[in-house]
Amino acid sequence: LHTGMSFFSGDPNFCPECGNVLPLPGIQNTVRCPRCSFCIPVETNFITCDYNHQSSVALEDEEDSELKGPVIDRRCSRCNKEGMIYHTRQMRSADEGQTVFFTCIHCRYQEKEDS
């Protein structure tokens, strides 16, 4: 466990000690670098970004799970209502496009699209 002075600074997605990509924060109040074990405290204040002036929504269902993300004008193929939340992941090789996952804000139906 190393929490001393850091050598790198800048992007919060990278370890300030060794420059490795950091994992996403979990339920702990720290993020630990998988390479050098440098610990970084996680702040409880989150900054929300406005992606192309899209609205953001957080929904709760019967199981108390939340949907979070930007809402786009996309029609659900199951309930035929407008409005879906999306997130992206790099599921294929790095030289191919990302996979976009959509979730309907009304019926929670999920779709995916390779871009």
Image (cartoon, helix red, strand yellow):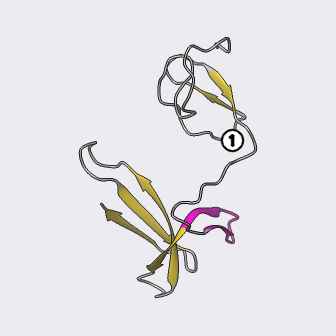
| Residue at 33% in and 65% down | 113
Residue 17: x and y in percent read 56, 17
Callout 1: 10 Å neighbours few (<14), some, many (20+)? few
The reply to whether the magenta stretch includes residue 69 is: yes
Which residue extends farthest front? Answer: 53
| Residue at 66% in and 62% down | 65
Vertical relation: 64 (above or below) 93 = below
| Residue at 53% in and 60% down | 51
Vertical relation: 86 (above or below) 40 = below
Q: According to the image, label 1 marks what residue?
A: 27
Which residue extends farthest right? Answer: 44
* Front residue (pair 17, 58): 17
Quarter containing the C terminus: bottom left
Residue 59: x and y in percent read 66, 69
Magenta residues, dominant SS class? strand
Secondary structure of residue under mark 1: loop
Q: Which residues lie in the magenta part?
A: 56-70
Identify residue type, mark 1.
Answer: Ile
